[in-house]
Image (cartoon, helix red, strand yellow):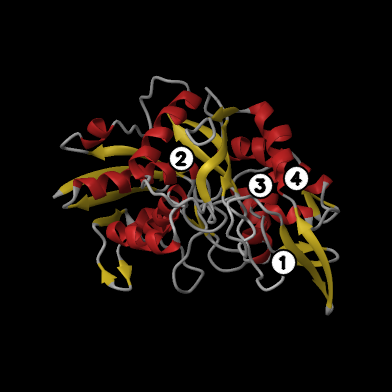
Amino acid sequence: MEKITFTCETITPMFIAGADGQTPELRAPSIKGALRFWWRAVNGHLSLKELKEREAEIFGGTNPARRSSVSVRIDFNKKHLTEKTILEGQPSNYVDQFKNHFNLAWENFNRAYQGKDAAITYLFYSVLFQGKRPFIDIGLKFDIIFTSRSQECLKKVVATFWLLVHFGGIGTRTRRGAGAFAANVKEDEKNLLREWDIKFGDNQKNEIADFVQNNYQKVINLIKIESNSKKNTFTNLIDPSIFVSNHAENLSWNTVLSEVGKPFMEYRTRNKHKWDKMAIFGLPIRHKRGTVQIRKKNRRASPLIISLFKVNGVLNWVVIKMGGNFNIKHSSNDIEDLDVIMKKRGKIENGTASHQILENFIMKEIKPISKEIKSQDNE
């Protein structure tokens, strides 16, 4: 049996709960669900049939029933989790408690928060102002243990875990910086990570951008399945745009997240009158004129991911514009804009989401303040 254990730590608030929707829980299925997402993102070029079949070989499936080839367990101190659980229930002053807990400099003005951390409320809007969800605080430590009889399957899962740790998170609002966590190797008796040349966490000699660049392409090569299929229909890491900050000093999570959240908030605010074009950032959008959505569906996840990661004890941000076709009704390889509607009081107004407005945000707001991570797909 092959085994690798990581010691992890939450680095941004993690909005995650159990069946009641109110009690924070950290469970293995949440980790496995996130791993499936990133594995699919790497293999988004496969047909849906092949994608499901190959995914089931590693993570298990239901039709036909198949057990996962890799076991994922979480170990943590339950008392520590209780201590790190903040704001149980739905207090009326939820946002103020969140603000005070993290000592964020917000000022309530004109029905919007102002100040250096205003972007945090913008990024976490749905869980602060709508759901009022409790969360797991930063600093919760927990172990994730991967075991498998197949070294090949374990390699692919651990490589996928690298993407989750450095590009994603667990829980709600992970595409906007919540639920991020750091990971360091705790146990690897057979030195498999050295054999696979995958590096996590601290004691890295390269600059941040070089560390991400080198490891990103390695894990992609380990995970990606070669195929003649070229659909690229689903949200994927085929020909993505990836940018990282390059901090050398350790800053607070809200300072680092605000650094990228502020231009994101300001760009969307400047362009909010372009209600249909801005739908590319994700749906639905609550607009003063109504609700923006796809004609037959209420939701469409944003192709833009903002997250934090920690290397050598220093926090940095990453921005990823995922590949794939935002317009899910089409199946061609070409990027196509999406027909959207504005609904209010029974009236419908038609519009079209624009990939160009997202591309402008990346090129004008993000690229000048970051380092770009190249991939074999976009070189």
Amino acid type at image mark 3: Ile
Q: Which mark is residue 293?
A: 1
Looking at the image, tell me whether mark 2 or mark 1 is earlier in sequence order.
Answer: 2
**Between marks 2 and 4, how big is the CA–CA gap?**
26 Å
Q: Residue at x 39, y 49 (%)?
A: 227
Q: Residue at x 66, y 50 (%)?
A: 123
Q: Marks 1 and 3: in contact by CB < 8 Å?
A: no
* Of the pair 251 and 144, the residue shown nearer to us: 144
Q: Residue at x 47, y 67 (%)?
A: 23
| Residue on which disc 3 sits | 120
**Between marks 2 and 1, how big is the CA–CA gap?**
30 Å
Q: Quadrant of residue 259?
A: top right
**Between marks 3 and 4, how big is the CA–CA gap?**
22 Å
Looking at the image, tell me whether mark 1 or mark 4 is earlier in sequence order.
Answer: 1
Looking at the image, tell me whether mark 3 or mark 1 is earlier in sequence order.
Answer: 3
Spot occupied by residue 25 in the image (x, y as percentages of width and height) = 41, 62
Of badges 3 and 4, nearer the viewer stands 4
Q: Marks 4 and 2: in contact by CB < 8 Å?
A: no
**Between marks 1 and 4, how big is the CA–CA gap?**
17 Å
Q: Residue furthest bottom?
A: 346
Of badges 2 and 1, nearer the viewer stands 1
Amino acid type at image mark 2: His
| Residue on which disc 4 sits | 357
- Left or right of 82 in this view: 339: right
Q: Element under label 3?
A: helix
| Residue on which disc 2 sits | 166
Mark 2 packing: few (<14 Cα in 10 Å), some, or many (20+)? Answer: many
Looking at the image, tell me whether mark 2 or mark 4 is earlier in sequence order.
Answer: 2
Looking at the image, tell me whether mark 3 or mark 2 is earlier in sequence order.
Answer: 3
